[in-house]
Image (tube, rainbow, N blue to C red):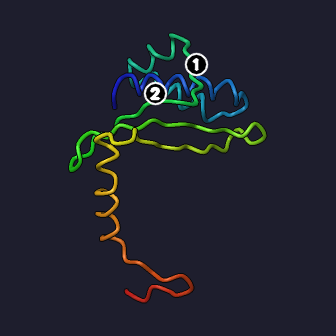
Amino acid sequence: MLPEVAAAAVATLRRESGRRPHDRALPALVDELRTTDADVARWWEDHTVRDYTSVAKRIQRPTAGALSFDIEIVVSPHEPDQMLIVYTAEPDSPTARLLPLLASWDADAVPSVEPGTSDTTS
């Protein structure tokens, strides 16, 4: 994991610990991570809180290489634990050009089943 992604995850843990003061498992998780990883301890001690709605993400795939996405996170004000996470690729970017190819690989691997029927291949 990239250090900046890991640091953002720790900042998100800090935000969640503030949102969930009665959650006993979360402080135990944070304590375990802090005692086993010096970077986590350092990031926790800097008191950064992260609450993002937009973020860039880069995924390294062995067969496709680097894929770059913009991510939008939409949270309902009435249901803050439910999130809609939308990945988009810049039009005509290398990632956008690769996505149809990657989707075609998956389409060949998964047998299709007509609606209203059952898959009888076993």
Residue 37: x and y in percent read 39, 23
Question: Which residue is the site of mark 2?
Answer: 33
Residue 78: x and y in percent read 78, 40
Label 2 secondary element: helix
Residue 113 found in image quarter: bottom left
Indicate the amino acid at tag 2.
Answer: Leu
Question: Which residue is the site of mark 1?
Answer: 49
On screen, 88 above or below 4? below
Residue 70: x and y in percent read 45, 35
Choose mark 1 or mark 2, whichever is in front: 1
On screen, 73 above or below 52? below
Marks 1 and 2 in Cβ contact (< 8 Å)? no
Give the camera-side residue of 76 and 121: 76
Q: Which residue: 50% across, 24% down?
A: 10
Residue 52 found in image quarter: top right
Q: Is 83 situated left or right of 30 in this image? A: right
Indicate the amino acid at tag 1.
Answer: Val
Say which label, 1 or 2, has the lower sequence index: 2
- How busy is the neighbourhood of tag 2: few (under 14 within 10 Å), some, or many (20 plus)? some
